Amino acid sequence: MTGVTDILIVGGGINGAGIARDAAGRGLSVTLCEMGDLGSATSSASSKLIHGGLRYLEHREFRLVRESLSEREVLLRAAPHIIWPLRFVLPHHAGLRPAWLLRTGLFIYDHLGGRRMLPATRTVRLGPNDPLRDIYRTGFEYSDCWVEDARLVVLNARDAADRCARVRTRARCGEARMVDGVWEARLIRPDGGTETVRARALVNAAGPWVMNVQGAMGALGNRRTVRLVKGSHIVVPRLHDDPRAFTLQNADGRIVFVIPYERRFSLVGTTDVVFTDDPGRAQASPDEIAYLCGVVTAYFRTPVSPADVVWSFAGVRPLLEDGSENPSAVTRDYTLDLETPPDGAPALTVFGGKITTYRRLAEDALAKLLPTLGHDGRPWTAAAPLPGGDIADADFERFAAETARRFPFLPPAMARRMARAYGTRIERIVDGATTLAALGWDFGGVTEAELDHLRRDEWAMTAEDALWRRSKLGLHLDAGVRADIAAWFERALR
């Protein structure tokens, strides 16, 4: 049909971007709309981990853990610039889970997902050179992976756009209705302007706003509900020089991660709090901040108080309502609801999910949608690198060293940071330059050329987009420089 896209995806978080990439790579025409910036809500407020979810074993979610563990290495190969291995130390707490239970869980964790690239679990003795208090003598060291979560979203959207998908940010789906057998959606821009998109299928991947989008779709798709659960994190000055992260048990059954972050900091999280407000206003509460500080202080030699917090953030997880009384026990697995009216176009709604399994979720979504569209495109993303991820042998350290040699005019810290952020696509920023001055004004470690790349190729429209999602430079630049970058964006977008 002329003027009709195959799939309209509402929601530019990791699930929406992943589905857009997969669908575009199978030859479908795709439009992705996002009411804010890409990954501006839940997908940029995670614990930044590609992991199996060790604690999900306690809830007997073996299928979810198996799928998550197998995806770790798929994603590690696809994006070795923004995903890398991370070792965790789980100290044994004498009053909580017994050592035999931890060993058993980690044995299953090592063997459930077909681990090949990552090292196995080992028992470690903790001593005076470790950052933990003396009462913790034994620990278990295991593997998972770190991810730059917001960049993962952007790279999926970038790959989708490179395969001819249309990506519309700052475009809210105000209404979607069936007209002549296809979906007709009205997208609303912040200035009040509108765009109408007609689609043969609609995907509701709006995350915490999934029920709002269902309301905009009318009577279709109201059989399930979600429970919104807020997870908060704090960032404090670096607590230890150890390159490993720490997994801390707490008496309430939860675990808290302490992760080396942005060289000078530690990332601490997360919480599980039922949330009933607007997801766009989620923030770490004083009680949550105090809770996280208390857990860290119970384990680390260096105590942490709310006064030490340099930044905090919170995201709202849209978990499928399963009746669990404990928010931590609500499944992190995803459910896909497909509705195919006999006289209309199909609608697929995404409930739940976690960042680690987004690629598999996208494959499952396409497996449901393709028969309704008369399309037989095959899965392809398992072996395909994300933009910038085509690094030889997935060896980032060698690539970073080569980058420093090729661009000796870049300060070493800048060269490594850019290699991490852009991988092989750093070429698009440097673009033949032979001096740092050729990249334009240097805002203390980020140049005009890089900002222009973020604006032109990665949909960044504000300093917040650039400094707090596509990078974490906001932690390293003072208020004056951040204001200068905000002014730069304002001039560039006039």
Image (spheres, rainbow, N blue to C red):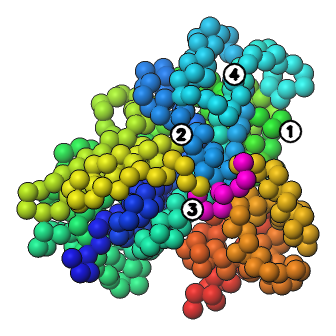
Amino acid type of the residue that numbered disc 2 sits on in the rendered structure: Glu
Report x, y in % for residue 101: 58, 11
Sort mark 3 into few (<14), some (14-19) or many (20+) by Cα contacts within 10 Å.
many
Q: Name the residue under label 3.
A: 155
Camera-nearest residue between 180 and 212: 180
Mark found first going from the N terminus, 1 or 3: 3
Marks 1 and 2 close (CB-CB < 8 Å): no
Image side of residue 14 versus residue 193, left or right: right
Q: Residue 71 carries which label?
A: 2
Image side of residue 462 versus residue 122, left or right: left
Mark found first going from the N terminus, 2 or 4: 2
Amino acid type of the residue that numbered disc 3 sits on in the rendered structure: Leu
Quadrant in the picture for residue 440: bottom right
Mark found first going from the N terminus, 1 or 2: 2
Which segment did they paint magenta? 386-393
What residue do we see at 22% from left, 73% from top?
A: 184
Where is 450 relative to 60, above or below? below
Q: Which mark is residue 241?
A: 1
Q: Residue 367 carries which label?
A: none
Question: Helix or strand or loop: what does disc 1 sit on?
Answer: loop
Sort mark 2 into few (<14), some (14-19) or many (20+) by Cα contacts within 10 Å.
many
Separation of disc 1 and disc 3 at Cα? 31 Å
Amino acid type of the residue that numbered disc 4 sits on in the rendered structure: Thr
Camera-nearest residue between 279 and 86: 86
Q: Name the residue under label 4.
A: 121
Mark toward the viewer: 1 or 2:
2
Question: Helix or strand or loop: what does disc 4 sit on?
Answer: loop
